[in-house]
Image (cartoon, grey):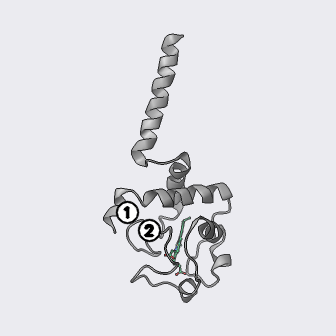
Amino acid sequence: MKLRRRAALLAACALWAAAGAGLAASADALRGEQLYGRCLACHALATDRVGPRHCGLLGRRAGSVAGFDYSAAMKKSGLVWDEKTLDRFLRKPLDLVPGSSMTYDGVPLASERRDLIAYLKAVANTAACRAGR
Ligand code: HEC
């Protein structure tokens, strides 16, 4: 009995340590990191690709990464990226920014959008993003 409880505790510790090693963040952000695989076709955290870099996204004006070739629609959108605007954009990008060049259908599940946004928030404090700033 005693032994078994100790094993359970050890297993819990191992899980906790594994989670902490990737990102010092919540389960949401960890799930978001996996979902971010869908974005990697076009985006990277610290470099511009088909889409602009995502480091520093939260709090940034839409269409404002210097040197990235945004659509006119994105530049004129007047949006600032926060949890609310990102949630609306990611649900259906072209609904919020008609004419955007982000030809991606969106993330229909609210829980997945929440996890993705938690991840995008959490990565701002990782080495990958700090180095790119
Ligand atoms: C098919 C390629 C593609 C995919 C996949 C894609 N994006 Fe984009 N994304 C773009 C392009 C291109 C832009 C620039 C849009 C514009 O200028 O209208 C963009 C812009 C953005 C912006 C605005 C950034 C800024 O600096 O204003 C955000 C936020 C964003 N994408 C998030 C995501 C997330 C999160 C995912 C994954 C769920 C994703 N994108 C998947 C191509 C893509």
Q: Along the polypeptide, which appears first: circle 1 or circle 2?
A: 2
Q: Quadrant of residue 67?
A: bottom left
In the image, residue 37 sits, relative to residue 93, either above or below, namely: above
x, y (%) of residue 116? 55, 58
Residue at image position (39%, 43%) is 21
| Residue to which mark 1 is pinned | 129
Give me the disc on residue 56.
Answer: 2
Residue type, mark 1 in image: Cys
Distance (Cα) linking label 1 and label 2: 8 Å
The local secondary structure at tag 1 comes to helix
**Residue 37 showing in the rendered view:** no
Mark 2 crowdedness (10 Å alpha carbons): few <14, some 14-19, many ≥20: many
x, y (%) of residue 128? 35, 60
x, y (%) of residue 34? 51, 53
Residue at image position (67%, 58%) is 110
Residue at image position (33%, 67%) is 132
Q: From the viewer's side, name the closer residue of 122 and 100.
A: 122
In the image, residue 38 sits, relative to residue 17, either above or below, namely: below
x, y (%) of residue 100? 58, 82
Residue type, mark 2 in image: Gly
Residue at image position (59%, 72%) is 104
Q: Are marks 1 and 2 in contact (CB under 8 Å)?
A: yes
